[in-house]
């Protein structure tokens, strides 16, 4: 399709004509020391296609995911893009500047618990603006995350079901195409991510095919984790025919059906005996707790078997602190939408 058949994409004061990349800021509000803004990149392809929104930095110390969206927006060029990319490289710039995990420093709110926002303090306003002005302009959306400070996790993608057959089929396809191996499809009322309040959950409920994408963690920015995000996003873009090439799923995948945290009951210095990607047996020792004099006081044992998807890296623990989150998994059931892309080596 020729350039003349495409329209400009406008968000706030940013206007991207077909064939253009624009970068700039969308005003959300202000503090006494300056504006609260969203950093935006709009890449408007020369040919027609869907609009895909990429958001990183809802948690702004999850650096692998932020680096991936920055990289994607610098690699993708409008002349070989069908459709449009709308990206937010760091949703919470105040978290980013302050190097603060989990919650925004202006109101101590976790943006990924209050989506889609609305009336309220600055995080609610920011979430609302993110949905009304940015994510809401797209048909598809990926919310990029990693484990936050103290969290090491195995890469995965998640989609929350809406009850709308076409959306749910596409959502599962995107999750399977993004993840290297593990994905989850969260039924309504499930505790599997993305849960209510998550940006990806709220977007799906608004009719946007939206997945949660996780790789990396604990304040790191490893190339392997960035690559999971970049490769996953590119695979999704190939599936949506936004860029050339066939999508690929490399090897058998597993579907997560439930998860369970094993927690310390005692407090002190913790020695971990489990790592991400371990298959943990019920009753297996996952950590040992030493009291303040260095005496062993607890061998923490896994309450249920499963795949260690999330391991907390804390060296000091208190009663009730989680040690490991094990996911129950099953081999991914057949899924014609994407089984054709499965490469069995
Ligand atoms: Zn996160």
Image (cartoon, helix red, strand yellow):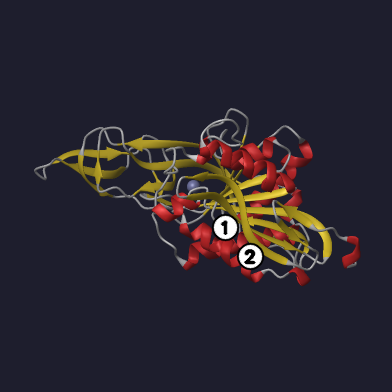
User: Is residue 65 at all visible to an observer of this figure?
Assistant: yes
Query: Residue 73, which numbered label?
Result: 2
Q: Which residue lies furthest to the front in this view?
A: 32
* Residue occupied by mark 1: 89
In this view, the residue in front, 22 or 323, is 22
- In the displayed structure, would residue 330 be above or below residue 275? above
Q: Residue 208, how many percent across, how many down?
A: 72, 43
Viewed as shown, does residue 264 lie left or right of 242? left
Q: Residue 13, how many percent across, how many down?
A: 70, 54
| Circle 2 SS class | helix
Q: Residue 335, how many percent across, how many down?
A: 72, 47
Q: Are marks 1 and 2 in contact (CB under 8 Å)?
A: yes
Q: Which residue is drawn at 35% across and 49% down?
A: 150
Dot 1 or dot 2: first in sequence order is: 2
Q: In which quarter of the image is residue 246?
A: bottom right
Q: Which residue is drawn at 58% across and 27% down?
A: 189
Viewed as shown, does residue 305 lie left or right of 170? left
In this view, the residue in front, 259 or 223, is 223
For marks 1 and 2, give the CA distance: 9 Å
Q: Residue furthest top?
A: 189
| Circle 1 SS class | loop
Query: Residue 39, which numbered label?
Result: none
User: Is residue 250 at all visible to an observer of this figure?
Assistant: no
- In the displayed structure, would residue 316 be above or below residue 70? above
Image quadrant in which the N terminus is located = bottom right
In this view, the residue in front, 120 or 176, is 120
Image quadrant in which the C terminus is located = bottom right
- The reply to whether the residue tagged 2 has its Cβ within 8 angstroms of ligand 1 is no
Viewed as shown, does residue 324 lie left or right of 125? left
Q: Residue 143, how many percent across, how many down?
A: 59, 49
């Amino acid at each position: 399709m020729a350039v003349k058949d495409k329209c400009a994409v406008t968000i706030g004061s940013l206007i991207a004509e077909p064939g253009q990349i624009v970068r700039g800021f969308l005003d959300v509000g202000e503090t006494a020391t300056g504006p609260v803004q969203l950093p935006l990149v709009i890449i408007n392809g020369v040919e027609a296609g869907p609009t895909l929104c990429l958001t990183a930095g809802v948690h702004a110390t999850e650096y692998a995911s932020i680096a991936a969206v920055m990289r994607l927006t610098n690699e993708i060029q409008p002349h070989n893009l069908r459709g449009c990319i709308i990206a937010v490289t760091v949703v919470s710039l105040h978290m980013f500047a302050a190097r603060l995990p989990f919650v925004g420093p202006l109101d101590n709110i976790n943006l990924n618990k209050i989506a889609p926002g609305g009336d309220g303090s600055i995080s609610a306003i920011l979430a609302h603006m993110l949905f009304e002005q940015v994510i809401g302009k797209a048909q598809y959306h990926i919310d990029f995350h990693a484990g936050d400070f103290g969290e090491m996790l195995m890469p995965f993608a998640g989609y929350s079901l809406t009850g709308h057959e076409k959306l749910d089929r596409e959502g599962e396809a995107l999750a399977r195409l993004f993840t290297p191996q593990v994905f989850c499809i969260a039924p309504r009322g499930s505790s599997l991510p993305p849960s209510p309040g998550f940006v990806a959950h709220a977007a799906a409920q608004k009719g946007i095919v939206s997945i949660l994408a996780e790789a990396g963690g604990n304040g790191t920015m490893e190339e392997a984790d960035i690559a999971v995000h970049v490769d996953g996003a590119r695979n999704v873009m190939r599936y949506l025919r936004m860029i050339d090439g066939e999508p690929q799923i490399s090897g058998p995948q597993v579907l997560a059906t439930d998860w369970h945290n094993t927690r310390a009951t005692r407090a002190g210095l913790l020695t971990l005996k489990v790592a991400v990607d371990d298959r943990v047996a019920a009753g297996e020792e996952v950590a040992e707790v030493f009291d303040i004099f260095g005496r062993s006081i607890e061998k923490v044992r896994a309450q249920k078997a499963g795949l260690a998807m999330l391991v907390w890296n804390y060296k000091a623990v208190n009663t009730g602190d989680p040690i490991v989150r094990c996911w129950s998994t099953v081999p991914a059931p057949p899924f014609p939408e994407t089984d054709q892309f499965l490469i069995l080596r």
